[in-house]
């Protein structure tokens, strides 16, 4: 069994005031710590949207295809894919990438489970330390 590090960041960001799918997708990404002000050309956002489209169509996509569709360097695409893989949002199989699940609501539920497992592990270790230090 391979145990891989997973980095999940949650940032409390004000929700968009009006219903606009692009603003809501950006809000979702910001809330998950994916998008930052450093991403001047919104390349990670655009990559995220392309992954949503390909996953919904049940067509995992290669980094080369993403680079071509988004007019980005393959290095930029791979950098962003690694961030999405590390967060547990994207999975890779046979050099093709897709969202972990086909539905964003289910994706959030899966991430919630990941966070709960991590918190349960932290709590257990904290309990053991407390016992050892007789706190």
Image (cartoon, rainbow, N blue to C red):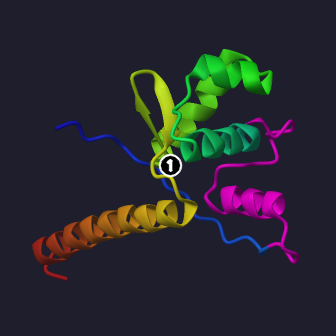
**Any magenta on residue 25?**
yes
Above or below for 130 versus 41: below
Neighbor class of circle 1 (other Cα within 10 Å; few <14, some 14-19, many 20+) is: many
Left or right for 14, reference 59: right
Left or right for 77, reference 98: right
Observer-nearest of 38 and 65: 65
Q: Which residues are magenta?
A: 16-43
Left or right for 113, reference 89: left
The image quadrant of residue 21 is bottom right
Above or below for 7 versus 112: above
Q: Residue at x 19, y 76 (%)?
A: 127
The image quadrant of residue 74 is top right
Could you say where residue 10 lies in the image, as x and y percent from the top left? 58, 64
Left or right for 63, reference 101: right
In which quadrant is the C terminus drawn? bottom left
Q: Residue at x 68, y 38 (%)?
A: 50
The image quadrant of residue 70 is top right
List the residue tagged with mark 1. Answer: 89
Element at label 1: loop
Q: Residue at x 16, y 38 (%)?
A: 1
Q: Residue at x 80, y 21 (%)?
A: 71
**Any magenta on residue 88?**
no
Above or below for 119 versus 96: below
């Amino acid at each position: 069994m391979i145990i891989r590090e997973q980095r999940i960041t949650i940032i409390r960001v004000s929700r968009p005031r009006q219903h606009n799918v692009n603003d809501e997708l950006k809000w979702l990404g910001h809330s998950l710590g994916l998008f930052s002000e450093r991403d001047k050309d919104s390349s990670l956002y655009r990559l995220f949207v392309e992954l949503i489209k390909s996953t919904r169509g049940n067509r995992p996509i290669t980094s080369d295809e993403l680079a071509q569709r988004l007019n980005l360097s393959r290095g930029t695409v791979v950098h962003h894919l690694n961030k999405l893989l590390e967060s547990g949002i994207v999975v890779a199989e046979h050099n093709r990438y897709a969202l972990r699940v086909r539905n964003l609501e289910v994706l959030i539920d899966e991430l919630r489970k990941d966070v709960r497992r991590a918190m349960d592990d932290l709590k257990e270790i904290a309990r053991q330390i407390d016992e050892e230090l007789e706190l």
